[in-house]
Image (cartoon, helix red, strand yellow):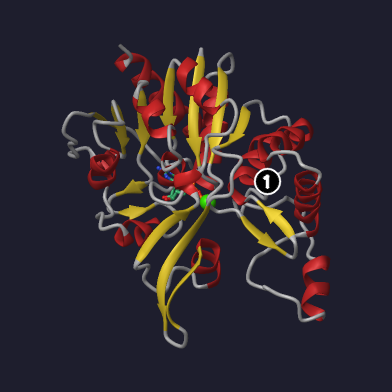
Amino acid sequence: MKIVALAGGIGGARFLRGLRAAAPEAEITVIGNTGDDISLFGLRVCPDLDTVMYTLGGGIDEEQGWGRSGETFAVKDELAAYGVGPSWFGLGDRDFATHIVRTQMLAAGYKLSAVTEALCARWRPGVRLLPMTDDQVETHVVVTDPEKGRRAIHFQEWWVRLRASVPAESIGAVGADDAKPAPGVLAALDEADVVLFPPSNPVVSIGTILAVPGIRDAVAANTVVGVSPIIGGAPVRGMADACLTAIGVETSAAAVGALYGPGLLDGWLVAEADADVRVDGVEVRSRPLLMSDPEATEELARAALDLALELKR
Ligand code: GDP
Ligand code: CA
């Protein structure tokens, strides 16, 4: 069986770990979001790809959900001692090595997809991890800064430095219009038996991947089941509500299901608290959606996969 999953960071990675356990025989291809990517200290950082790679490869800081386990911050402290910022983005010593290897390979002319494959040779995530595109796409957010006025800032500055405390007036994936899907992305979608949307951020994770021309149509041509990141009107973790508000969508399982809509989704898994949710043209089922431990996560992934196989025409 061939499964394709679109994935952001933490929500995507945790779901994928459950999916790998639920379908050990399946060939799983992950199309990762690169809209969160940022250049810091001259290094290219791909937070969502790395979260998937570290989580599935056993190198993640489990508690935090991102970054390396057993991390130290000597480099960050030294940079701060030089007064070189930004200080708001947490990069640990171990994590730095990943970004150094990536940046070195990119500078040597390798595409991000080849670099990701090389990094995964170490981590052996048990899935094929593809960036959505080899082209540069960066999510930017328009905010009104009390001092600097209305301006666009990098998504990470809004999300990590400002903790989404300033409302986003709009969110855009800069460069997406001209981006091409990375090698293997469209072929994987074409060959997939089913496509799954983990409970990743619908705006800045899944939404950004779908913004790369060609990907949305290739996804829509398949049988697609999504898992809601919203339970009982709130994101399980993080600030996805701030992203949804920015695009004029209510923070509810029903509204996110309708945002993807019947054009994309065949099935939509919602939490038991949202059992009354209906989405026109989409088969909605309720299940426990909390990825609280490996067993519950595997159970959730199995439910998504089973529903997709049931709805597959
Ligand atoms: P990010 O890139 O690290 O923000 O991660 P993703 O975009 O992959 O996922 C973020 C989303 O995961 C958030 O909107 C959360 O609501 C959702 N999420 C996190 N943990 C859980 C969980 O246990 N269950 C469900 N259903 N959603 C979760
Ligand atoms: Ca992310």
Q: Is 44 situated left or right of 32 in this image? A: right
Task: Name the spot of residue 89 as percent of width and height, x first.
Answer: 64, 66
Task: Name the spot of residue 91 as percent of width and height, x first.
Answer: 71, 61
As drawn, 128 above or below 232: above
Q: Is 27 situated left or right of 276 in this image? A: right
Give the image quarter of residue 144.
Answer: bottom left
Q: Is 137 situated left or right of 217 in this image? A: right
Residue plotted at (62% across, 32% down)? 129
Q: Residues within 10 Å of mark 1 (few under 14, many from 20)?
A: many
Instruction: Depth check: give the residue in front, 231 or 131.
Output: 131
Instruction: Depth check: give the residue in front, 119 or 44.
Output: 44
Residue plotted at (44% across, 74% down)? 151
Query: Quarter of the image containing the C terminus?
Result: top left
User: Disc 1 residue type?
Assistant: Ile
Q: Is residue 135 visible?
A: yes
Furthest-front residue in view?
Answer: 178
Q: Which residue is mark 1?
A: 60
Instruction: Depth check: give the residue in front, 159 or 137.
Output: 137
Task: Name the spot of residue 222 as percent of width and height, x first.
Answer: 37, 21
Residue plotted at (67% across, 40% down)? 112
Task: Name the spot of residue 183 as percent of width and height, x first.
Answer: 60, 28
Furthest-bottom residue in view?
Answer: 147
Q: Is mark 1 within 8 Å of ligand 1?
A: no
Q: Is 185 situated left or right of 164 in this image? A: right
Give the image quarter of residue 28.
Answer: top right
Element type at mark 1: loop
Q: Is residue 293 visible?
A: no
Residue plotted at (64% across, 40% down)? 55
Give the image quarter of residue 166.
Answer: bottom left
